[in-house]
Image (cartoon, rainbow, N blue to C red):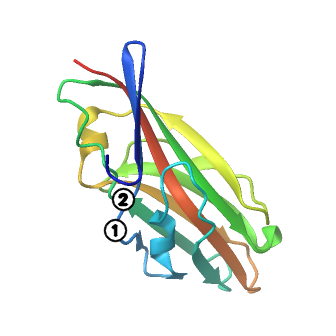
Amino acid sequence: MRRGIVASAKKNSTTIASRGSGTPADNGVATWATKTNAVDGAVGTNPNTYATWTNSTSSGVGYIEVSGYAFSSIPAGSTILDVKVVIRHLCSNTGRITSTVFQAFDGATSVSGSQGTTLSTAAHDETMNFVCTLAQIKSATFKIRVTTTHAANTQSLVFSLDHADVTVSYAPP
């Protein structure tokens, strides 16, 4: 079993979990440091190493996209029952961020609604559940985008993302 993948069987369904791999992308407008920290460690662990977005631009928007999820082992003809995304994050000052949301994409197409988060200076998990197609979850362009919007001031802030894990429950053919 590859590092970062966890599989288990339930009655009439199977569950597989993955953490992204490779170097996450960003929107290039804002500076993300140590981006690969968003994909280190194994599924379900909190390595407490963070990809960080530092910004002081009023109403500035920064996003990071985590991809490289390992779902190629899901058999053709399977039915996707549920997809769960868990991100772990924190920010340096909750008054300097308007919002943080995350959502799943296949390329440029959203395959989930966006999920808002609770802003906190303590690291914590946020969860989103949705259903997508087998083709979308196995796509080479499947990714999780985390977007943060700076408040309407020029005070510096740091947003930190520890990981974005994805768990897929499916019924084999």
Q: Is residue 150 above or below residue 41?
A: below
Q: Residue furthest top?
A: 11
Q: Residues within 10 Å of mark 1 (few under 14, many from 20)?
A: some
Q: Give the label on residue 161, or none.
A: none
Measured from the top left, where is residue 111 in percent x and y?
39, 42
Residue at 48% across / 55% down in the picture? 42
| 99 relative to 28 in the view: left or right | right
Closer to the chain start, of discs 2 and 1, is: 1
Measured from the top left, where is residue 104 in percent x and y?
43, 48
Q: Is residue 49 above or below residue 106?
A: below
Element class at badge 2: strand
Residue at 62% across / 57% down in the picture? 88
Element class at badge 1: loop
Residue identifier under label 2: 67
Q: Is residue 58 above or below residue 128?
A: below
Q: Residue furthest left?
A: 76
Place residue 53 in its image quadrant. Answer: bottom right
| 76 relative to 149 in the view: left or right | left
Viewer-side residue, 63 vs 37 = 37
Q: CA distance from mark 2 to mark 1?
A: 7 Å
Q: Residues within 10 Å of mark 2 (few under 14, many from 20)?
A: many
Viewer-side residue, 98 vs 51 = 51
Place residue 20 in its image quadrant. Answer: bottom left
- 2 and 1 marks in contact (CB < 8 Å): yes
| 69 relative to 49 in the view: left or right | left
Q: Is residue 88 above or below residue 133?
A: below
Q: Amino acid at mark 2?
A: Ser
Residue identifier under label 1: 22
Q: Amino acid at mark 1?
A: Gly
Query: Which numbered mark, 2 or 1, is in the foreground of this view?
Result: 1
Residue at 45% across / 45% down in the picture? 166
Measured from the top left, where is residue 73 in percent x and y?
24, 38
